Image (tube, helix red, strand yellow):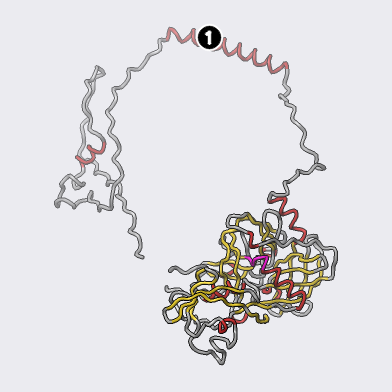
């Protein structure tokens, strides 16, 4: 299986490059033959013996057969292919290495008989000169009279240019109309930290000063190191109300009221092929608008490392998303937010987030963002659902396997947890969740975190070769 592009956060730009996301382990062709060609034939040697000149009388000469030039050269050049020369075939100055199909030989054309020259009698020269002079004089007189009558250039009346006071009206459903409605609510977030400075994006969530962005945009901000820049250039200091690395979301508060929030749409209603618009500040370029479509839904994406890993059941888009777009909105044709731009994929062996967009961008679904933002505003913390098992990362068979042993004192199946209550045991293999096949542990985690605590999911489980369906009611854990 070829290595898949690794998603990385669309990092704060320019200084804060995104950390590449770990990829699921995957098991890791002769060079094409060079195109062949045939060289042009070598020129034939020129004869060295003198050729006596012959007198050709001007009378009619009967046509003679003249061989084509290539044929004459072939006959005159010893050693050329097809003509034995000194040393036998393949030797001599005309020998060539065969490298494939050659160029076609030029077509031979019969020599044409020379046309007899036409002789103009001197008796006609004088009358022709007189006629030419008369014609020239008449033309000059007529031309000068015509020019003398009116030397003004021709003109044409054109409609006047539209007045600057009458701007062109854009359809609100057009890209320009959508951008005009969204841009005033999109902000740039500038961060100062001990490691340096960077910038990301966000958007107004509530009119009383709450702004939604990515956790990785603000994670490094120190005391007083966060500034929110609005579309009109207004700069206000901001503070982080709450953040979660599990969902890569953060809420920032500024002291302002009367702001214009964006509407959060229903990300579950999005379908592949829907047009979308991404807005943000890639590389610090505030107010950048790019367009594309929804390329896929429910795309399992893992970004970050260690305890900062983010699991996203993402909306994939081909709208250009670059470092600095992080936290900006992905909106639908009605200008409603359906996703929060969070990560981009990079080719294996690439330059990380510095490589820019390759048409594989990922956004956190708006329904997930709404639930998490409400928790962060209310309590300052977010929770995420769990089933209470540890998964075997080394397993490469069908489905996802529950570990067969405890890890650093943590049980592979949490006692009296959701999985334990549903009858799931060590070493069981989970094949599907709600009918959706899972092939990696990341896919299962992403599918679970797309739900809420208290939701019930149906798992298909294999135990000792026997498959069965179990229903699991999700518990919750607090975000770090």
Tell me where residue 433 appears, x and y as whole percent: 54, 72
Visible residue check, residue 24: no
Q: Nearer the viewer, residue 51 or 95?
A: 95
- Report the magenta stretch's main SS: strand
Tell me where residue 401 appears, x and y as whole percent: 48, 80
Number of disc labels: 1
**Which residue in the structure is indicated by mark 1?**
131
Q: Nearer the viewer, residue 458 or 198?
A: 458
Tell me where residue 192 appears, x and y as whole percent: 73, 75
Magenta includes 159? no
- Which image quarter is the N terminus in? bottom left
Vertical comparison of 43 with 129: above or below: below
Label 1 residue SS:
helix
Tell me where residue 56 appears, x and y as whole percent: 23, 23
Name the residue located 53 percent from the left edge and 82 percent from the top edge.
423
Vertical comparison of 18 with 421: above or below: above
Q: Nearer the viewer, residue 48 or 375?
A: 375
Q: For the magenta stretch, what is the residue range?
A: 363-367
Q: Nearer the viewer, residue 205 or 374?
A: 374
Mark 1 surroundings within 10 Å by alpha-carbon count, few (fewer than 14), some (14 through 19), many (20 or more)? few
Quadrant assignment, res 456: bottom right
Q: Residue furthest bottom?
A: 409
Name the residue located 66 percent from the left edge and 59 percent from the top edge.
278
Vertical comparison of 86 with 46: above or below: below
Name the residue located 85 percent from the left edge and 66 percent from the top edge.
257
Quadrant assignment, res 222: bottom right
Magenta includes 365? yes
- Which image quarter is the C terminus in? bottom right
Visible residue check, residue 161: yes
């Amino acid at each position: 299986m070829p290595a898949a592009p690794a998603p990385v956060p669309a990092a704060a730009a320019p200084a804060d490059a995104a950390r590449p996301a770990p990829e699921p382990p995957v098991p890791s062709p002769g060079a094409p033959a060079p195109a062949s060609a045939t060289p042009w034939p070598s020129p034939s040697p020129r004869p060295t013996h003198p050729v006596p000149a012959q007198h050709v009388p001007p009378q009619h000469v009967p046509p003679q057969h003249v061989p084509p030039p290539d044929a004459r050269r072939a006959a005159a050049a010893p050693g050329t292919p097809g003509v034995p020369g000194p040393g036998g075939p393949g030797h001599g100055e005309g020998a060539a290495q065969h490298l494939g199909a050659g160029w076609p030989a030029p077509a031979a054309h019969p020599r044409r008989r020379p046309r007899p020259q036409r002789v103009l009698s001197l008796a006609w020269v004088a009358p022709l000169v007189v006629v030419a002079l008369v014609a020239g004089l008449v033309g000059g007189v007529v031309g000068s009279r015509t020019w003398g009558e009116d030397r003004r250039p021709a003109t044409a009346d054109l409609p006047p240019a539209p007045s600057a006071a009458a701007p062109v009206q854009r359809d609100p459903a057009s890209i320009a109309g959508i951008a005009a409605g969204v841009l005033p609510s999109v902000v740039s977030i500038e961060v100062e930290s001990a490691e340096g400075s960077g910038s990301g994006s966000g958007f107004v969530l509530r009119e009383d000063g709450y702004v939604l962005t990515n956790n990785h945009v603000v994670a490094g901000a120190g005391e007083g190191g966060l500034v929110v820049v609005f579309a009109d250039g207004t700069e206000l200091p901001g503070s982080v109300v709450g953040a979660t690395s599990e969902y890569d979301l953060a809420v920032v508060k500024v002291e302002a009221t009367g702001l214009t929030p964006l509407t959060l749409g229903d990300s579950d209603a999005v379908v592949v092929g829907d047009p979308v618009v991404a807005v943000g500040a890639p590389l610090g370029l505030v107010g950048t608008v790019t367009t594309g479509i929804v390329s896929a839904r429910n795309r399992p994406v893992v970004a970050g490392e260690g305890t900062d890993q983010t699991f996203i059941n993402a909306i994939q888009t081909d709208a250009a998303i670059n470092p600095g777009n992080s936290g900006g909105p992905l909106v639908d044709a009605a200008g409603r937010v359906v996703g929060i731009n969070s990560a981009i994929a990079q080719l294996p062996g690439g330059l990380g987030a510095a490589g820019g967009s390759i048409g594989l961008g990922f956004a956190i679904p708006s329904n997930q963002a709404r639930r998490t933002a409400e928790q962060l505003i209310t309590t300052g913390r977010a929770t995420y659902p769990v089933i209470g098992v540890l998964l075997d990362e080394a397993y490469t068979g069908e489905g996802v396997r529950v570990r067969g042993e405890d890890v650093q004192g943590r049980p592979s199946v949490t006692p009296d947890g959701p999985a334990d209550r549903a009858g799931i045991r060590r070493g069981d293999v989970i094949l599907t969740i709600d009918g959706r096949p899972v092939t990696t542990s990341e896919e299962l985690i992403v599918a679970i975190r797309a739900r809420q605590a208290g939701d019930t999911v149906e798992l298909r489980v294999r135990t000792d070769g026997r498959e069965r369906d179990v229903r699991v009611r999700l518990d919750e854990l607090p975000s770090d």
